[in-house]
Image (cartoon, rainbow, N blue to C red):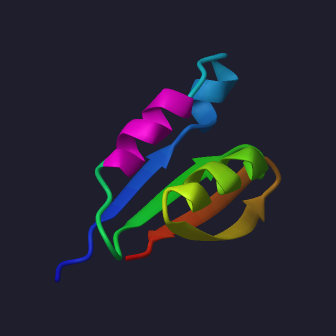
Amino acid sequence: MEQRIIEIDVREDLKNKIEPFQKIMEAVKECKENDIFILHAPFKPVPLFAVLKAKGFTHEEEELEKKHWKVTFTKKG
């Protein structure tokens, strides 16, 4: 089974006061089992962890630099 990777960066959206939640939900809706969704954000998006866990995702986060977090979500079967 082919694994897809979907990657979005919401740092510009947030800087421009655009709420990215809908954009994120649209992206994860496309994810199938074992697909990976990578999110770049200016902060650790803790509230999103519970939302995506309920949708079957696990996650790993890392702070790449100040105001740049990379969170890798994996869709479990």
Question: In the displayed structure, does residue 21 sit left or right of residue 62?
Answer: left
Q: Residue at x 28, y 50 (%)?
A: 30
**Residue 64 position by quadrant:** bottom right
The range drawn in magenta is 21-29
Q: Residue at x 62, y 37 (%)?
A: 11
In this rendering, is residue 18 above or below 5? above
**Which of the two residues, 29 or 65, is positioned nearer the viewer here?**
29
Quadrant of the rendering where the C terminus is positioned: bottom left
In magenta segment, residue 56: no
Residue with the most extreme right position: 66
**Residue 10 position by quadrant:** top right
**Which of the two residues, 51 or 36, is positioned nearer the viewer here?**
51
**Residue 14 on image: x %, y %:** 65, 27
Quadrant of the rendering where the N terminus is positioned: bottom left
**Residue 33 position by quadrant:** bottom left
**Which of the two residues, 73 or 8, is positioned nearer the viewer here?**
73
**Residue 19 on image: x %, y %:** 60, 22
In magenta segment, residue 27: yes
Residue with the most extreme left position: 1
**Residue 7 on image: x %, y %:** 41, 54
Question: In the displayed structure, does residue 21 sit left or right of residue 23?
Answer: right
Specify the principal SS of the magenta part: helix
In this rendering, is residue 71 above or below 10? below
In this rendering, is residue 37 above or below 75? above
**Which of the two residues, 14 or 27, is positioned nearer the viewer here?**
27
